[in-house]
Amino acid sequence: MILDSKIPAGPLAEKWTKHKFNSKLVNPANKRKYDVIVVGTGLAGASAAASLAELGYNVKAFCFQDSPRRAHSIAAQGGINAAKNYQNDGDSIFRLFYDTIKGGDYRAREANVYRLAEVSVKIIDQCVAQGVPFAREYGGLLANRSFGGAQVSRTFYARGQTGQQLLLGAYSALSRQVANGKVKLYPRTEMMDVVVIDGQARGIVTRNLITGAVETHAAHAVLLCTGGYGNVFFLSTNAMGSNVTAAWRAHKRGAYFANPCFTQIHPTCIPVSGDHQSKLTLMSESLRNDGRVWVPATQEIAEKLRKGQIKANDIKEEDRDYFLERKYPSFGNLVPRDVASRNAKYVCDEGRGVNETGEAVFLDFRDAIKRDGRNIIEQKYGNLFDMYKQITGEDPYEVPMMIYPAVHYTMGGLWVDYNLMTTVPGLYALGEANFSDHGANRLGASALMQGLADGYFVIPYTIGDYLAQIPPKKVDENHPEFAKAKEEVQNRIQTILSINGTKTVDYFHKKLGKIMWDKCGMARTEVGLKEAKAEIKALKKEFWSNVKVLGTNEELNQTLEKAHRVADFLELGELMVDDALNRNESCGGHFREEYQTPDGEALRDDENFAYVAAWKYMGEGQEEELNKESLVFENVKLTQRSYK
Amino acid sequence: MKLTLKIWRQKNASDKGGFATYPVDHVSKDMSFLEMLDVLNDQLTEKGEDPVHFDHDCREGICGMCSLYINGKPHGPLQTTTCQLHMRSFNDGETITIEPWRAKAFPVVKDLVVNRSAFDRIIQAGGYVSVNTGGVPDANEIPIPKTIADLAMDAAQCIGCGACVAACKNASAMLFTSAKISQLALLPQGQVERKTRAEKMVAQMDAEGFGACTNTGACEAECPKGISITNIARMNREYFSAVVSSENV
Amino acid sequence: MSWVTKTLKSTLGRKLIMALTGLFLILFLTGHVSGNLLLFKGDGGEAFNIYAKFMTTNPAVKILSYLTYISVIGHIIYSILLAQHNRAARPVGYAESKASTNSTWSSRNMGVLGTIILIFLVVHLQGFWAKMHWGQIPMVSYDGEEYKNLFLIVSEAFKQEWLVALYVIAMGFLGFHLSHGFASAFQTLGLNHKKYSPAIKALGQLYCIVVPALFASMPLYIYFTAN
């Protein structure tokens, strides 16, 4: 199939405006005749559900958590970018577009990224109008901070809880529509499958997590706003429940999966402390504004440090290697995430890691506290420092923080066209669940921007274009495809419950995570990836013959929920490895050791790999088919990213 | 560390439920409380016993999904969420009692899992500014004094975990409700619906069956986000002035 | 349902009644304790008896006294309503609770304290107030005018150790009740301010010690001066 990205013709800055005008509209009186399903209630889902309900569509919103407000968008700390140029420091829509495209290592679509930058300014207006308490200056106007990968201050924030405040804003808009009767809410409900009839998405199959009831829901369009798949690594900064199931089921029903190997490793997370670890905690990237990253200059000093013979504060200035500042004098500690992460890995691989496991570097606030005073630092990062202390038992005002990269975000996701529609008509993917805007690496404070852009300002226009072309007749839930999909889900549940093996679900998840981290993580090699593929295949086989899931379907059964998710991660893991193997270049978060510049930077191959790899599911046990969408760059010149 | 866990087990909403005692071994001080329960659940699964169900998701103290009444206190001995509580706060050999949140408005779903959708309904009653997407003024059009924005943010930090209800001797949801009413009453954006909001949210809070406030301050002392009971005073003010002056009969 | 009844049925409305009646009773206590200080005058009760007559006959005071009765009754009724509501809000309690780590004992036991104070009140009213209004009290005359000699009744009563003890203990409970109730009433009314709340709290703490202590000192003074 030829992938049609449906990018409108014309100059970059006019594409979106023209496209909106050219899109068909649904008559206001007809909108109430269309049903839309929104799966997931994070930034993308809640904003989409609320906005579509405001327009008059009937919306059903689903989430697996007990309340829409729990979606993992809530955990985003640092901020949200917008090209407001309130700081008069040279920002513009084009600059935000340019930074994002460049930050993504030229593996994103120009038109999508430009639209993202364009609507970014409206997001801030919308959120302020909802009562989101962004940080302000004493004069009462909005405050900004700078973030990795940018040389302007364009990040809006609400202390270290920007994601929370934005999500609660979207949640409040959603709640208002629930009260108005335009949105019906289904909490503690997991999407188990998409129902496709005559090639069009017409509904979903869900499982009620309390009663176990498997149900079907029909609609004229289905929106997947289900986030990323970072939990394939077991340890990540994602929430425990974050999963790929919805996206993966859609993939198996015909939606192409794009760039699955593009995963973001975030540089500033609290290091792993032991085998019991269930998740990793992120410390906002904004900390890099004031914290300085360093390790001891020599292995010997690092060794003493690890053995506890010396303390970090005892190490003299000349024995410290501020490696980011040294290697990247112009961006310093504010280099993009992939660069910061990789360099942390390098110094640790050199034996200069600073904690017991040897996998940690320092993030030091000593100088910032000396310069600005403890008060200022406390105001900026107080809650992050508290959180760090809570988890590690150490006080970052006194001793430097220890950080290490961890899986944080997935740039890959369901392939979507300019309208955010997947390759299955009527099936859309928004936010982190799609692949569209971040290329091979996402810049800080861009995830919130994209989630809300998709939900508030893109889908309300593009969905109309699709719905206007299909009759407003109620979708018939008695169509045999609904019964068939439902039965398949029930069978799968019974299969999992009947295996009754000896290993827990977490056993498989942890094993998969280790394979992925070691071989498809921060650095990848052809040999390692091939090993990984074989190992995952074997693990998958073992899972389906030896997993132990107790209890029944007809109750709250958290192990059963997890088993479904892990089963899908096992399949996705294999595809990620395939994708990483296929991409014989290094770009952004995808770093193939075979392809690097002499000084260890990612070496892109624009001639052969300036494309989106969109994978088509070919059936159980079959290799997936690669489809390429060429990336055309008309407005930016592809250069070797340099943050020196 | 070795611990004894006394945990509330209840098959479903209609089951009577009761305590079960489990020994748990190989607990490290660096584990979070929930990771310790993961260890227990692994042990139970291996023995073929139903694992203990508890709510949790982000495990970084912000989603508000985790609950648990640990040794007589919501979220345990520290003023934080259960997921951010670490085993270094306990002693080797200790017996730890774990109960679900107890309130009529938070019925038990299973074991330690409770239904907190009452909170959603309180927000649905008016915890929003009625603006549709698009057509809003520029974000910098209305300056908001930093002190006011900060106060609003203090209130807006609520994670909706329900520890306030769990801690309150009356199972009152005043802290939760007042945090949202306060946030929007403080900001200029919330002024238009200020009175109606206060009236409706309080009415919904009562309808859900939460208790009244005795101003003991337990909610504030246990709130993992340190939401202040000055918000409750503000809510009272908002409510009383609303009922006497609004046009809602 | 009219907006008034709806408001008074709400948890906040009920709390409003508790706060307003409570504050009025605090005002009453202030007046009561000030007047009763005349017991210490050492004039054989003359000032006290004149004051007592004024308090039972002055029309303005009459109105205030009716307000006091209403406040007492309202405070009691609404406390019962709230207690019922609050009990229903948690049908299943906790097996283990460390409430002492997050709140004061008196704040959690206002109902218990109030009940004890109510029992005391019955004894107190029956002993003095009922006698003053309807009982047989010996008369005394100052400057040719007749007064009921309430001072005599009081002096006689507080020669009994058990009654003195009862009063002193009851004032202890009153002190605890006020230690929470004073500031709590302001909080309920929404009168909370960064600048003034600390002063209100301090005043409450002072009040809950001084007023009950003054009340308690009266029977003690009489008991020790009489014996």
Image (spheres, coloured by chain):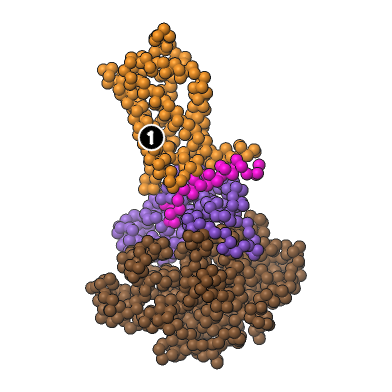
Vertical placement of A282 versus C80: above or below? below
| Residue closest to the eye, A442 or B9 | A442
Q: Colour of chain B?
A: purple
Write down the chain letter for disc 1: C
Q: Range of the magenta residues?
A: B222-249
Q: Which residue is drawn at the image coordinates 31% and 65% (left, top)?
A: A398
* Location of the N terminus of chain A (image quadrant): bottom right
Which percent across, then down, holds residue A219? Answer: 68, 67
Q: Is residue B84 magenta?
A: no
Residue identified by numbered label 1? C207
The chain coloured orange in the image: C
Horizontal arrangement in the rendering, residue C86 relative to residue A28 (left or right): left
Does the magenta portion include B229?
A: yes
| Shown colour of chain A | brown
Indicate the amino acid at tag 1.
Tyr
Image quadrant assignment for residue A252: bottom right
Question: Can residue A417 be seen in this snapshot?
Answer: no
Residue in view at x 43 percent, y 54 percent: B226
Q: Predominant secondary structure in magenta?
A: helix
- Under circle 1, the secondary element is helix
